Amino acid sequence: MPRWEPNAAERLHDAALGLFTAQGYDQTTVAQIAAHAGLTERTFFNHFSSKREVLFGRTSEIQKRVLVREVRACPAGLRPIEMVVRALRATADEVLEDFRVPAAPRRTIIDATPELQEREEAKRAALTAATAEALRERGLDGETALLAAGAGLLIQQAAEQRWIQPGERRPLRDLITEALTSLRLVTEPE
Amino acid sequence: MPRWEPNAAERLHDAALGLFTAQGYDQTTVAQIAAHAGLTERTFFNHFSSKREVLFGRTSEIQKRVLVREVRACPAGLRPIEMVVRALRATADEVLEDFRVPAAPRRTIIDATPELQEREEAKRAALTAATAEALRERGLDGETALLAAGAGLLIQQAAEQRWIQPGERRPLRDLITEALTSLRLVTEPE
């Protein structure tokens, strides 16, 4: 990446989010995003392969790295879901909490754009697969790894929904813990 | 759909699966699939919009209809996850059990083909969204509906993994019940 454009990815992300909100996703071009960020199209494509990547690009790669690192670093003896929740809380602190302000408008754009919803599903599936793989490396069987990773990403999704509610001030890490409790309530026997 | 080609969708599905297995997904063309099914390319495109739909097309639409119908038909007073599991078991009986024989080779092809994995994720997300919507219509709040539907589709995924194991003979409906128990074990507190 070009060192001479500081924070280019963030500037492009913010410019894209502003334009998508103001005029719609379909009506916004990469040229407009680059211009609003004070950058060239070429710089855009140094950072993102296409318009549909600009709201995801860097974050989900970093999330994946932190998730895998944290699952590997868990102390022995934790239950599977505790390993995953611990890793998700680290990801919230290290990666996501900084994106709280744009998280609500970003959610609005994604929910209104099937192309971005599909992209988000694929990213979530990739995070689930990477987490499950890290759990298998820790000795869990395939089914337990799938269920713990899948439950974790579901918890993450519910926590992010709360996190972007107007008036919600608690950090994402706390909402992840709450969402685990909610999942247990929803799935428990009578 | 043309009435004069009985079981065209099934014949195309089976021809595609055979060709994908024998020579690979990328190496197989729609023309070859149609020829192996004894049908024309035009008939193929009457049933499926592209090669990547042929392993999914009809089943996931029918699955969605049955899931939504069953959630709507649940007796009052069931717990959220019980509503979803009941609907999944009905879907297993009415739709999926007939596809047991091709399920294992189909899984092998999808796991080896990123394009099909992405398609499968999108289909699963659509089933989750439809189930959550049906649960909200039954009066559940958005978070409970998301968690119950998401947990349900995760249970479905784990159950299908067991269902295709060599030597496994139990019907999918029973494996769904087992997978709910496994999910509870994986997520329960110490």
Image: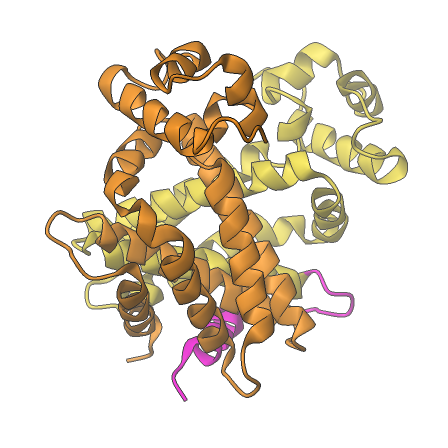
Chain colours: A yellow, B orange
Locate residue B55, reporting x and y percent: 41, 33
Residue displayed at 75% across by 13% down: A40
Task: Give the camera-side residue of A43 and B143.
Answer: B143
Whether residue B55 is situated above or below residue A68 in the rendered picture: above
Locate residue A114, reporting x and y percent: 68, 38
Locate residue A32, reporting x and y percent: 83, 20
Question: Is residue A90 visible to the viewer in this orientation of the structure?
Answer: yes
Image quarter for residue A112?
top right
Quadrant holding the N terminus of chain A: top right
Task: Give the camera-side residue of A39 and A162.
Answer: A162
Identity of the residue furthest to the front in this view: B4
Identity of the residue furthest to the right in this view: A22
| Numbered disc total | 0
Q: Which residues are magenta?
A: A164-190
Residue displayed at 72% across by 39% down: A113
Please indicate whether residue B106 sits to the left or right of residue A90 in the image: left
Image quarter for residue B30?
top left
Question: Is residue A63 visible to the viewer in this orientation of the structure?
Answer: no
Whether residue B111 is situated above or below residue B137 in the rendered picture: above
Residue displayed at 32% across by 45% down: B99
Please indicate whether residue B161 sits to the left or right of residue B72 in the image: left
Image quarter for residue B135?
bottom right
Please indicate whether residue B54 sits to the left or right of residue A50 in the image: left
A186 falls in the magenta region = yes
Locate residue A87, reporting x and y percent: 39, 56
Whether residue A1 is situated above or below residue A24 in the rendered picture: above
Quadrant holding the C terminus of chain A: bottom left
Whether residue A118 is situated above or below residue B89 in the rendered picture: above
Task: Give the camera-side residue of A121 and A15.
Answer: A121
Residue displayed at 63% across by 41% down: A117
Please indicate whether residue B15 sits to the left or right of residue B71 in the image: left
